[in-house]
Image (cartoon, rainbow, N blue to C red):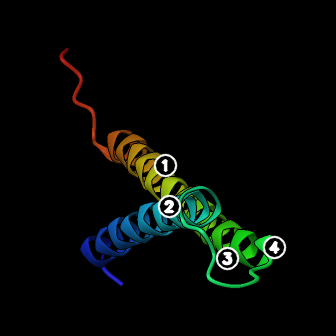
Amino acid sequence: MSNEKKMQLTRLQGIIAIASFSAGVLIACVCLFFIEPLGQIDTSAVSIVSELLILCGAILGVKASYDVKFRKFQAELDQVLENENKPTTLNL
């Protein structure tokens, strides 16, 4: 997979992480504080959905962050190796 595709995938994972985290917080806030239930709703059903969405956002967010930092580290190592492999000229 090319670096450009990897960056697009990382960007997509970041967007999904933000969206799922936001959806989890929104569902928790709206369902628990603002909407009166029509019948008997167990609060654990609402909280488990919101907690799973928040967990998904956190996991994807950490992975996307790790991917970005790993690419930066890899680019720095490539730069060091490139500098070491350059022939040096001596001015005598």
| Residue on which the image places disc 1 | 69
SS at badge 4:
helix
Mark closer to the chain start, 1 or 3: 3
Viewer-closest of 8 and 15:
15
Residue at image position (27%, 33%) is 88
Q: Amino acid at mark 4?
A: Ser
Rendered location of residue 9, percent (x, y): 36, 75
State left or right for residue 81 relative to residue 45: left
Separation (CA) of disc 4 from disc 2: 16 Å
Q: Amino acid at mark 1?
A: Lys
Q: Mark 1 or mark 4: which comes first in sequence?
A: 4
Instruction: Give the CA separation, mark 3 to mark 4.
Output: 9 Å
Q: Callout 2: few (<14), some (14-19), or many (20+) C-alpha neighbours within 10 Å? A: few
From the viewer's perspective, tell me whether residue 91 is left or right of residue 70. Answer: left
Q: Amino acid at mark 3?
A: Val
Residue that numbered label 3 is attached to: 49
From mark 1 to mark 3, how far is it between C-alphas? 30 Å
Numbered disc 2: secondary structure: helix
User: Dot 3 lies on which element?
Assistant: helix
Residue at the spot of label 2: 26
Q: Which residue is mark 4?
A: 44
Q: Measured along the vertical axis of the image, is residue 33 above or below residue 83?
A: below
- Does 87 sit above or below residue 11? above
